[in-house]
Amino acid sequence: MAKTDYKSIDEYHSVFSGDTAQRMQQIRQAVHQIVPDVQEMISYQIPCFKYKGYLIYYSAYTNHISLSYPFSDQLLANFKEDLKQYKVSKSAIQFPNNEPLPMDLITGIIRFRKSENEMAAEKGKK
């Protein structure tokens, strides 16, 4: 694989076409709708969002889109039923490219991560 040095999410998206680019853009838009003051960045050469800490990452592959972050046990337990049909690890959830993105699930995960980050930030202030 060629070495990459993406400087922005737009640059990362630009190497993908069609459905893959559109699917990533759906996730990006969802993050911005739920967390309007989120900061976009590239981390580990993939799209990343920060809000009171790291919020969520995503990346595209031949057969799936991954939503990633070191997910908490609470998040995985909260979405356990919804995640049954996907390949899931402690740090990634794979959404197959031959199926529609489960945007209700993805937005739920983003909201949950936002809440986790807000609670952690509040604890840090005390």
Image (tube, rainbow, N blue to C red):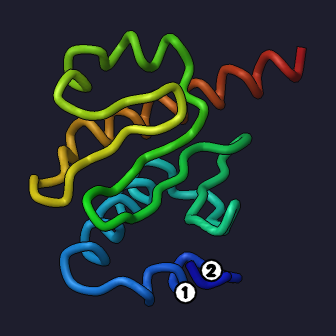
Location of residue 59 with respect to 50 vertically, above or below: below
User: Could you say which disc has been placed on residue 11 in the image?
Assistant: 1
Q: Nearer the viewer, residue 15 or 40?
A: 15
**Residue drawn at the location 29% of the way across and 15% of the way down:** 80
Location of residue 47 with respect to 94 vertically, above or below: below
Q: Nearer the viewer, residue 113 or 84?
A: 84
Q: Position of residue 67 (x, y in %)?
A: 42, 47
Q: Position of residue 72 (x, y in %)?
A: 56, 19
**Residue drawn at the location 34% of the way across and 71% of the way down:** 25
Q: Disc 2 marks which amino acid?
A: Ser
**Residue drawn at the location 46% of the way across and 61% of the way down:** 59
Location of residue 19 with respect to 122 vertically, above or below: below
Q: Disc 1 marks which amino acid?
A: Glu
Q: Where, by quadrant of the figure, is residue 18 drawn? A: bottom left
Q: Position of residue 92 (x, y in %)?
A: 46, 38
Residue lying furthest front: 1
Q: Where, by quadrant of the figure, is residue 15 drawn? A: bottom left
Q: Position of residue 38 (x, y in %)?
A: 60, 56
Q: Nearer the viewer, residue 35 or 102?
A: 102
Please count the marks in the image: 2
Residue lying furthest right: 126
* CB-based contact (under 8 Å), mark 1 and mark 2: yes
Residue assigned mark 2: 8
Q: Tell me the quarter of the image containing the N terminus.
A: bottom right
User: Could you say which disc has been placed on residue 62 in the image?
Assistant: none
**Residue drawn at the location 17% of the way across and 29% of the way down:** 85
Q: Is residue 111 left or right of residue 11?
A: left
Answer few, some or many: residues within 10 Å of disc 1's Cα (few below 14, many 20 plus, some between 14 and 19): few
